[in-house]
Amino acid sequence: MDSRVREEQAIRVHSEQAGLFVARYGEMARGPYESCFAYSRHRLSMLLERLLPRDAGGRLLDVGCGTGHHLAWARARGFEVAGVDGSEAMLTEARRLNPGVTIQRAGVDTLPFEAMHFDAVLCIEVLRYLPKTDDCIREMARVLRPDGVCLATASPLLNLSLFPLFNRLGLRFSSLGFLRLKQFFDTSIGLKRRFRRAGFRVVDVHGVHLGVFNWVEKVVPRVLPGILAAAERYDAVISDWPLLRDLSGMLLVHAVR
């Protein structure tokens, strides 16, 4: 299966899941410890708050904006925002949440904006669905002004949840009930190499949270909120420790143009 077919398959699956993601983000209002999804986005938001530039009125592009959650989040922090996504179903939800915002259907490897137009770029949970990420990363570098910041997540190859293994098993054995969508996994070393090759002069990679909590959610979900609340301050340190961050449940690239 070639790269274009895989990307189209990912867009189709995410179109089918647009309502699910709206519901998931809606559930976050109940608190950051209600599910692993809510916790992962909570931990991610903490890092985004720390790493995004704080210039009032800066321009921000969300590459693969999905249902528009992070567009709304950035707007509330004073950014002039724009978004692109390949799924019209996702864009419908994003436009509903962000009326008046420039939100376009476009491929993440051919961004419809001029060079050096944005101060910041987000790319949340997109790279994991791309067989080849180089074009997307180069496009994000192209549309950023000098000293602009890119924040992009990736799925770790060594995730303690063992999701990379289950993803491959699900593709091979459909009876296991896993989502049959091939995903692609990274290491911090590989991510640094690709972002530098694309033209970013400074590249750091952070671990966002430990993937081990997914096992708690599957086995004893009732105790998950209490465990997450008690463990967060330790998780924030351990998951981003250089020797352990590749074992985390999510990696965040912080790259400066």
Image: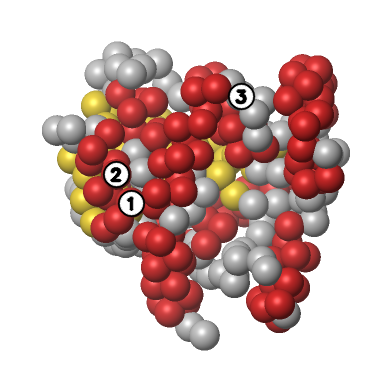
On screen, 174 above or below 138? below
Q: Do the residues labelled 2 and 1 touch (CB within 8 Å)?
A: yes
- Which residue shows up at 70% across the image and 51% down it? 156
For label 3, the residue is 32
Give the amino acid type for the residue marked by disc 1 in the picture. Met
Give the image location of residue 90, x and y in percent. 33, 51
CA separation in Å, label 1 and label 3? 23 Å
Asked whether, in this view, residue 196 is left or right of residue 242, the answer is: left
Give the image location of residue 127, x and y in percent. 52, 56
CA separation in Å, label 2 and label 1? 5 Å
Q: Which colouring convention does the figure follow?
A: secondary structure
Task: Specify few, some or many for label 1: CA neighbours under 10 Å numbering under 14, 14-19, or 20 or more.
Answer: many
Q: Do the residues labelled 1 and 3 touch (CB within 8 Å)?
A: no
**Can you name the residue that lies furthest to the bottom here?**
1
Q: Camera-side residue: 8 or 59?
A: 8
Q: Along the polypeptide, which appears first: circle 2 or circle 3?
A: 3
For label 1, the residue is 90
Q: Along the polypeptide, which appears first: circle 1 or circle 3?
A: 3
Give the image location of residue 244, x and y in percent. 83, 39
Give the image location of residue 184, x and y in percent. 62, 64
Callout 3: helix, strand or loop? loop
- Which residue shows up at 37% across the image and 60% down it? 15
- Which residue shows up at 81% across the image and 25% down it? 227
On screen, 196 above or below 69? below
Give the amino acid type for the residue marked by disc 3 in the picture. Pro
For label 2, the residue is 93
Give the number of callouts: 3
- Which residue shows up at 83% across the image and 45% down it? 219
Q: Are marks 2 and 3 in contact (CB under 8 Å)?
A: no
